[in-house]
Image (cartoon, grey):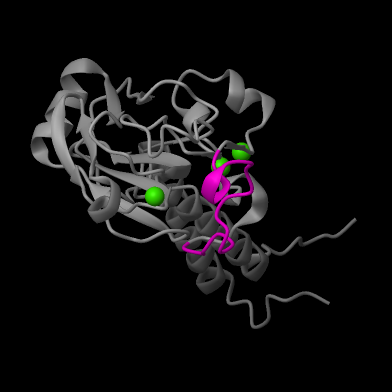
């Protein structure tokens, strides 16, 4: 047995520093609500972000690769908007691009909904959409609404181009989310003949009035306790006048 067990000061400080780093890493991130609909798998065939599909278009059977279906079984069965991802075209265009080439989409409907349940109040939100083959000047712009509020998605990225976009939602949309507890992104293809595609949709939101990196109260208490112990350890070292704390 050791007659005089020394306080492992340096080991204690190292342990406390590790605990603090872990605590800060676990602090709430900037986005306190995050939900992705569909998956980030490159439109179901591994296309890199902001990349281009092959010159022939999506790997489907119809013109420009239309009627492509790269969905998983879960995405095919989904009703929250994931069923609109990894297919080309994401929606059946109305009017059709060509009356003699009916294979244009695995879907036969022209209006889709991406539905995010938001069960808490939010202060701000960003909608991220990985979208492909938008050609507003060729086929006409897609009509898009957030909870019934008209948006402008008149993008001209071009045939085969895909783009990851981040839409900062305006105050009216945030208020409508807080009023209804959800975000309904309505994608209306009734006024456009443009064939389009989506890889995924993601909503990130912050809570109102909560500093984005503030530790939780329990964490603050832990930090205070740790600082107190450091002070006690330092005081003890001064009291006993230990010249060397490292042990043998
Ligand atoms: Ca997928
Ligand atoms: Ca297109
Ligand atoms: Ca996908």
Q: For the N terminus, which image quadrant?
A: bottom right
Q: Observer-nearest residue: 174 or 167?
A: 167
The image position of residue 66, as x and y in percent, is 54, 42
Tell how many labels.
0
- Quadrant location of residue 191? top left
Outermost residue, left side: 172
Q: Main secondary structure of the magenta part?
A: loop
Find out whether residue 209 is within the magenta segment. Answer: no
Left or right: where does residue 49 sit relative to residue 127? right
Give the residue displayed 77% in from the left and 62% down from the top.
Answer: 4
Left or right: where does residue 217 sit relative to residue 191? right
Find out whether residue 59 is within the magenta segment. Answer: yes
The image position of residue 54, as x and y in percent, is 59, 62
Highlighted magenta segment, given as a residue range: 50-66
Q: Observer-nearest residue: 209 or 34?
A: 34
Q: Observer-nearest residue: 169 or 185?
A: 185
- Quadrant location of residue 182? top left
The image position of residue 47, as x and y in percent, is 60, 57
């Amino acid at each position: 047995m050791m007659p005089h067990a020394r306080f492992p000061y340096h080991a204690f400080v190292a342990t406390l520093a590790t605990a603090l780093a872990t605590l800060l890493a676990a602090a709430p991130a900037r986005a306190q609500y995050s939900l992705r609909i569909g998956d980030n798998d490159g439109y179901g065939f591994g296309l890199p972000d902001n990349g281009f599909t092959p010159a022939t278009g999506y790997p489907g059977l119809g013109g420009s690769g239309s009627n492509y279906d790269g969905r998983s079984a879960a995405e095919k069965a989904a009703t929250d908007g994931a069923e609109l991802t990894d297919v080309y075209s994401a929606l059946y265009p109305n009017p059709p691009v060509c009356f003699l080439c009916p294979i244009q989409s695995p879907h036969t409907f022209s209006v889709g909904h991406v539905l995010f349940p938001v069960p808490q109040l939010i202060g701000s939100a960003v909608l991220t959409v990985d979208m492909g083959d938008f050609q507003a000047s060729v086929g006409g712009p897609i009509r898009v609404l957030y909870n019934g509020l008209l948006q402008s998605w008149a993008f001209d990225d071009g045939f085969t181009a895909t783009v990851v976009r981040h839409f900062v939602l305006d105050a009216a949309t945030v208020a409508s989310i807080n009023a209804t507890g959800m975000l309904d992104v309505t994608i209306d293809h009734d006024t456009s003949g443009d064939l389009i595609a989506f890889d995924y949709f993601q909503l990130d939101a912050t809570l109102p009035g909560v500093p984005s990196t503030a530790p939780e109260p329990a964490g603050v208490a832990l930090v205070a306790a740790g600082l107190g112990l450091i002070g006690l350890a330092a005081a003890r070292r001064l009291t006993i006048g230990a010249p060397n704390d490292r042990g043998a």
